[in-house]
Every structure is written in C-alpha cells, then in structure tokens.
Amino acid sequence: MSECIFCKIVAKEIPGKIAYEDERILAFYDLEPQAPVHVLIVPKKHIASLDEAGTEDSELLGHLLGKAKEIAATLGLDNGYRLVINTGEDGQQTVKHLHVHLLGGRKMTWPPG
Ligand code: 5GP
Ligand code: ZN
C-alpha cells in the first residue's frame, strides 16, 4: 500500500510525531489537531476502514483499543477523552487507513457536527 499516507508514516518514509509504538500499532499526533490532545492510533497493517476489518483482525483491534486508554493515561487525560472512528463517505473518512482519533484536553461537544 505504497500510496497510503498512514502506511508511509508507519514505515517512517514520512515523518510523524510519535506518541506510542509497538509491533502492531502506531500512535502519532494529528497534523490538524481538533483538541489540545489529538492523536491518531493506527494498526501497522493496512486496513482501509473499519468496514474492511475482518474477524481475523479482532485481536488487533482489541489490542488497539486497550492501548488507546493507556495512551490517554500517558498523555494525562485523567478527566476523560473521546475516541472516534470515521468510516466511509457519510462518516467523513478522508484517509483510507483505519485510524482511531484520540481527542482530549477540553470538554467535547455532543452531537458532533
Ligand atoms: P479522517 O477524516 O479520515 O477520520 O481523519 C484523517 C486525519 O488525518 C485528519 O484529522 C487529518 O488532519 C490527519 N492527517 C492527514 N494527513 C496527515 C499526515 O500526513 N500526518 C498526520 N500526522 N496527520 C494527517
Ligand atoms: Zn495504509
């Protein structure tokens, strides 16, 4: 998936400000933060969207979610945070590599726009 921007960040072909990394996932700061803390958490494996994830990815996704709360704690989001997975057209997904937005550091609004 050489044309995928997040695969390139995973491969360190283009820079990303990394918040967390292990063998299966990478967390890096969003270029256009929508909150004081805005980190994207991605599987290193290219999965185009949540809709493309198969049952074989369940453990990977569980790992990612479990790490999301650890990353939130590491970043000091003791008062809460929001996880968002934009999916497909109506979900306004712009980058076609599954990613979880971790947002925090301010009170989130509801409903989102
Ligand atoms: P989506 O709209 O697909 O859910 O979110 C994509 C996110 O990726 C956006 O928040 C956007 O700011 C971020 N983004 C797009 N390109 C880059 C990049 O090259 N580096 C980083 N760090 N973030 C990016
Ligand atoms: Zn990718």
Image (cartoon, rainbow, N blue to C red):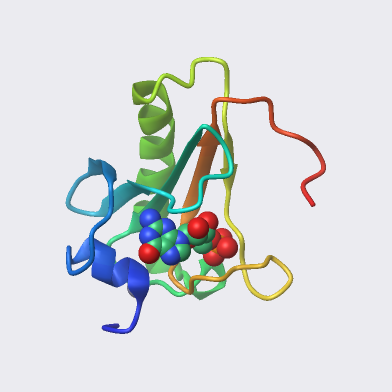
On screen, 76 above or below 42? above
Residue in front for this viewpoint, 44 or 39: 39
Residue in front for this viewpoint, 63 or 88: 88
Q: Residue at x 32, y 84 (%)?
A: 3
Q: Residue at x 19, y 46 (%)?
A: 22
Using residue 66 as the reference point, say whether residue 9 is left or right of it: left
Q: Residue 66's x, y, as percent?
A: 40, 37
Q: Residue 26's x, y, as percent?
A: 28, 51
Quarter where residue 111 is shown: top right
On screen, 22 above or below 42? above
Using residue 88 as the reference point, say whether residue 32 is left or right of it: left
Quarter where residue 103 is shown: top right
Q: How many marks?
A: 0
Quarter where residue 9 is shown: bottom left
Using residue 45 as the reference point, say whether residue 32 is left or right of it: right
Which quadrant holds the N terminus?
bottom left
Q: Residue at x 57, y 16 (%)?
A: 79
Q: Residue 55's x, y, as percent?
A: 44, 66
> Residue farthest to the top?
78
On screen, 98 above or below 21? below
Residue in front for this viewpoint, 32 or 64: 32
Using residue 107 as the reference point, say whether residue 59 is left or right of it: left
Residue in front for this viewpoint, 100 or 8: 8
Q: Residue at x 49, y 51 (%)?
A: 100
> Residue farthest to the front?
32
